[in-house]
Amino acid sequence: MGRKDYVMKYRRFTQDFKRSLIEQLLSETSSPAELCRRYSISSGQLYTWKRQYVEGKLDPEPSRETELAARVRELEHLLGKLTLENEFLRKAVRHSLKQVERRDASLPRIATLAQSIQRGVN
């Protein structure tokens, strides 16, 4: 017995099939258990399709509202990402400025050196 003896092929269901099954469920012409037995699917799969149906994901063409909601989610995700990036860059600039200030504070002042050199020459 090789490995391929245990490989199970996945079934593919069309959007139309899923939609018709959920419409039967919602119209209460068949119980969930009856639909699961008739079509040999699990109850979890049935309720996943029901959730997708309610969210509009089983529509042949996504509604304008569904498209806009998806776009809003995408833009909110992008906004969050850019906000984090902006905060990171601000912290990096602040840290860099503090390092420059520390370095400048530890260096002798050029003006005082120039004055002491002039005093020594005069």
Image (cartoon, rainbow, N blue to C red):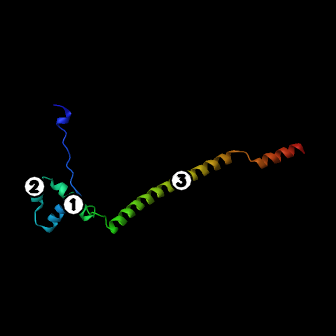
* Of callouts 3 and 1, the N-terminal one: 1
Disc number for residue 16 = 1
70 or 92: nearer the viewer: 70
* Secondary structure under the numbered disc 2 in the rendered image: helix
* Foreground: disc 3 or disc 2: 2
Identify whether 114 is placed above or below 26: above
The quadrant in which residue 26 appears is bottom left
Task: Give the left or right position of residue 103, taking residue 82 as reference.
Answer: right
* Foreground: disc 3 or disc 1: 1
Disc number for residue 37 = 2
Calculate the distance from the C-alpha at mark 3 to the C-alpha at mark 1: 49 Å
Q: Residues within 10 Å of mark 2 (few under 14, many from 20)?
A: few
Task: Give the left or right position of residue 76, taking residue 101 as reference.
Answer: left
Q: Are marks 1 and 2 in contact (CB under 8 Å)?
A: no
* Secondary structure under the numbered disc 1 in the rendered image: helix
Amino acid type at circle 1 is Asp
Q: Which residue is mark 3?
A: 89
Identify whether 114 is placed above or below 52: above
Q: Residues within 10 Å of mark 1 (few under 14, many from 20)?
A: few
Q: Are marks 3 and 2 in contact (CB under 8 Å)?
A: no
- Residue at the extreme top: 1
Identify whether 1 is placed above or below 118: above
Residue 98 at what x, y percent from top left? 60, 50
Amino acid type at circle 3 is Leu
Amino acid type at circle 2 is Arg
Residue 55 at what x, y percent from top left? 27, 64
**Quarter of the figure with the C terminus:** top right
Q: Residue at x 86, y 46 (%)?
A: 119
Residue 49 at what x, y percent from top left? 21, 59
